[in-house]
Image: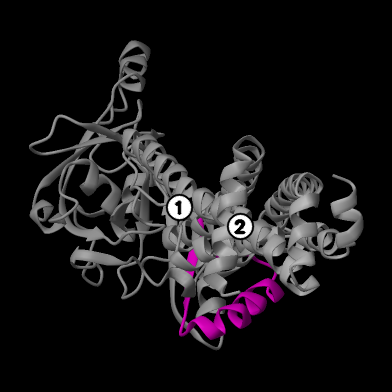
Amino acid sequence: MRFRDYLSVAAKDVRRQTGRSTLTIIALMISAVILITLTALSIGAKKAIVQELSPDNSLTTITVTSTKAGGLSGAFGTVQEAGKGSGKLTEDTVSQLTALPHAASVSPRAPIWELNTFTVAGSSKQFVAQAQGVTPQLGAVSIKAGQMFAPNDAGHNIILGYGYAKTLGYGDHPEQLLGKTITFTTQKGYRGDGASITGPTATAAQVEAFNQTTTQLTATIVGITGQGSDQNSVFLPMAWARNVRALNAWENGQLKSTDQLTNDGYGSIVVRADSKSNVRAVASAIDNLGYGEISTATQIDRLSQFSTVMWAVFGSVSVIALIAASLGIVNTMLMTVSEQTYVIGIWRACGARKSTIAAMFLLEAALLGLIGGALGGAVSVGVCQFINQHIAALLQAQNLGAVHVATTPIWLIAAGIGVTLAFGILSGVYPAWRAARQDPSKALASI
């Protein structure tokens, strides 16, 4: 017999027992959908993580903190211990980090809590000011449009995060925001640069009124950050940030200014390694100095481990579903063998070899696996598109960029079909063996 003849007989048997074949194919299809969809989610999530964490070559970035985490680490995070740091980050810390081998740039950052909200000229939208002071040096902030602060810049200039630019409708042309005025509203009772502080003879009522008053500060946008970890922040030159954070107050008839930034230290220091291959060496050196370190590369490694664990869990669920569907194939094929005892006897009496009988039943089982896998692959593509569309709608509602959390490459669809086909063939081995072992004389005599 030619392969076409085998296929014709197998197809007729599948059509003949419509009910059982349909149920078996549905079980295989569901198994394939589970396998392909869960694997697509695992692949897509990993790609989304890498895309979100490293769009601007931030794999070379290490964030240094004053305290370091310790304890048991693993795929699901780290148990943190307190009290292992040096207290605060100072200029001495900057000098130590600058001297490290393979540290291309060291940029301290200072959080500015005094700034509350801000608006951009030409827009009615008001944003929470997640402001930070940075030193004006190359590599301190990734720049998409405009330029970094000039050396010793103490002016009212800012670099706006790309996330704000996108929300304002300038995502494709952020350069159009350059030169626009931004207006900050400070916290109540602000006593830094630009505040109209009450005089030394002010009454208690005047002081209380001042403590309930906000101050407005204006600045000019000179740059827009790239996408990545900096895109949701607003950056000020460190010199101006120091003045904003200053606490001015009258004491014994004299106006005194307290440098809070020096007292508190920097919030963090961003170190950029000279290459991705040297990130872990730099991070280890920072750890040895007694400071905490968080690198994008480490985060991606940890999240990749988590993704691998989840894929293993999902894979186990898929295999269990496939085994259940395979038992359905075995049951269907055994019933087919039982129903076709007489037909098998005639085939054997007419000279059909055992291998021919086995091949026909194996092909029928393979056909069930192939149809179930193909339908499962098609449904999986639709399910993944549905998931991506709804996740994208959710992210857009939060003014976030859309990402594909479920990726279905061609090889994944082909692999899913191949797995169901393999399970179909394996499930058909025992029924095919039973059919081939039948004695033709007994098969004909039983009718």
Q: Which residue is mark 1?
A: 261
Q: Earlier in the sequence, mark 2 or mark 1?
A: 2
Residue 183 in the image: x percent, y percent? 18, 38
Which quadrant holds the N terminus?
bottom right
Span of residues in magenta: 267-295
Between 283 and 211, the one nearer to me in the picture: 283
Asked whether the viewer can see residue 397, the reply is: yes
Between 398 and 94, the one nearer to me in the picture: 398
Neighbour class for label 1 at 10 Å: few (<14), some, many (≥20)? many
70 falls in the magenta region: no
- 100 displayed left or right of 86: left
Vertical relation: 361 (above or below) 403: below
Numbered disc 1: secondary structure: helix
- 237 displayed left or right of 1: left
Which quadrant holds the C terminus?
top right
In three-dimensional space, the C-alpha distance between marks 2 and 1, rounded to whole angstroms, equals 80 Å
Mark whose residue sits in front, 2 or 1: 2
Residue 55 in the image: x percent, y percent? 37, 65
Could you tell me the amino acid type at mark 2? Ala
Neighbour class for label 2 at 10 Å: few (<14), some, many (≥20)? many
Number of numbered tags placed on the structure image: 2
Q: Kindly give the residue lying farthest to the bottom in the view shown.
A: 101
Task: Name the image colouring.
Answer: one colour
Could you tell me the amino acid type at mark 1? Leu
Residue 119 in the image: x percent, y percent? 19, 36
Q: Which residue is mark 2?
A: 10
Between 371 and 107, the one nearer to me in the picture: 371
Numbered disc 2: secondary structure: helix
Vertical relation: 253 (above or below) 330: above
- 224 displayed left or right of 37: left
Q: Kindly give the residue lying farthest to the top in the view shown.
A: 205
